[in-house]
Amino acid sequence: MSNFLTEKILLYRIFTKKDPEAYAELYDLYVQRIYRFVFFKVSSHENAEDITSEVFLKAWQFLIPNSEDQPEIKSFSGLLYRIARNSIIDFYRSRAAKPEVTLDENIDVGDEGKWYHQLANKMETGKIVEAIKKLKQEYQEVLTLKYVDELDISEIAEITGKSQLSVRVTMHRALKKLKQILGDKK
């Protein structure tokens, strides 16, 4: 069964029976994608876990309103990403004056030569991530949604509230700028 159909059936169970098991199934479908999206933005496992759990709590509260009105949801994943975006913004607003340094680099030095390749891969990935962080927020977001979260253009359009054409143009400009930044470093 497709994710879209599964999602609709689970949402129906949540709306009609307030079924926590149906929500748990939705959670299982999307938790890794949302965590990855959040982690890429905050670069800390602990903060990403906290924000991800907050996203799913807010989504549950949105789905189970106090009144009998059912909220209209075109895409549950779109709802989750919108909540995640807003939660990340709230996170950075609350920490605006507190810089943080992380020390969680894990490189296995046990195998001869293997550690060198791990380090080289981390360094290359680090260069790309740093280049992406130099882009404006709009560019960072579409690149993350497309290439990290592997969403299609229509999902990105729904999450960002833009047209599909606008998303394509933004993505093209973001890739062009990213290549420019990476080209300057070489």
Image: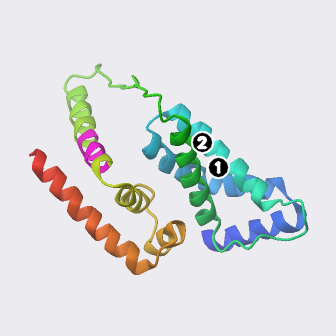
Q: Residues within 10 Å of mark 1 (few under 14, many from 20)?
A: many
The residue identified by callout 1 is 55
Determine the residue positioned at 39% across, 72% down: 167
Across and down, in percent, residue 100 comes to 43, 27
Residue 181 is at least partly visible in this image = yes
Q: Which residues are magenta?
A: 126-132
Given residues 125 and 79, the one toward you in this image is 79
Q: Is residue 144 above or below residue 10?
A: above
Position of 110 compared to 94: left or right?
A: left
Task: Look at the image and say whether residue 131 sits in the magenta stretch.
Answer: yes
Q: Residues within 10 Å of mark 2 (few under 14, many from 20)?
A: many
Q: What SS does tag 1 mark?
A: helix
Determine the residue positioned at 30% across, 50% down: 132
Across and down, in percent, residue 152 comes to 45, 70
| Quadrant position of residue 110 | top left
User: Predominant secondary structure in magenta?
Assistant: helix
Position of 3 compared to 152: left or right?
A: right
The Cα atoms of the two marked residues, 1 and 2, are separated by 6 Å
Q: What SS does tag 2 mark?
A: helix
| Quadrant position of residue 17 | bottom right
Quadrant for the N terminus in the image: bottom right
Determine the residue positioned at 60% across, 63% down: 77
Q: Residue furthest left?
A: 186
Asked if the residues shown at circle 1 and circle 2 are in contact, with their CB atoms under 8 angstroms apart, the answer is: yes
The amino acid beneath tag 1 is Val
Q: Is residue 172 above or below residue 96?
A: below
The amino acid beneath tag 2 is Ile
Across and down, in percent, residue 169 comes to 32, 74
Given residues 156 and 85, the one toward you in this image is 85
The image's mark for residue 51 is 2
